[in-house]
Image (cartoon, grey):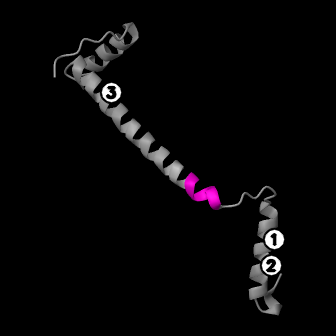
Amino acid sequence: MAASNLSLGAHWDRFIDRQVATGRYGSAGEVIREALRALEAREAKLSMLIAHLEAGDALMEDVPFVADFSLEKLIEELDAELDSDLPADRRH
């Protein structure tokens, strides 16, 4: 592949120069390649997340929506169910 000539602007030019100056990178090209690898990994994670969200959404299509959900009511129902499994002398 041929070398690319990029115009990044003063901000990114200074950023790249600072990264090279730290000694962690030997050239501007190394900084840019590292940035592209990080972007590629982020995009892959984002694609995977979107795929999982879409799969979960598809699974939920047949699940009815509960508009009047109450956590307190659910806890009361679970407590009642648990109490019914206990001997009479141990119930709430």
Whether the residues at callouts 2 and 1 have beta carbons within 8 Å, the answer is: yes
In the image, residue 77 above or below residue 32 = below
Q: How dense is the environment of label 1, judged by Cα within 10 Å: few (below 14), some, or many (20 and up)?
A: few
Q: Considering depth in this image, is 90 or 47 the residue closer to the camera? A: 47
Q: Which residues are magenta?
A: 57-62
Q: Position of residue 25 (x, y in %)?
A: 23, 24
**Quadrant of the snapshot with the C terminus:** bottom right
Would residue 32 appear left or right of 56 to someone viewing this image?
left
Location of residue 43 with respect to 74 vertically, above or below: above
Q: Secondary structure at mark 1?
A: helix
Q: Are marks 2 and 3 in contact (CB under 8 Å)?
A: no
Say which residue label 2 marks.
80
Q: Which residue is mark 3?
A: 35
Q: Disc 3 residue type?
A: Ala
Q: Taking 66 as reference, is 45 above or below it?
A: above
Which residue is depicted at the point 41% across and 42% down? 45
- Please, is residue 17 above or below residue 81 in the view? above
CB contact under 8 Å: marks 1 and 3: no
Q: Position of residue 14 (x, y in %)?
A: 35, 11
| Alpha carbons under labels 2 and 1: distance apart | 6 Å
Secondary structure beneath dot 2 equals helix
In the rendered image, which residue does mark 1 sit on? 76
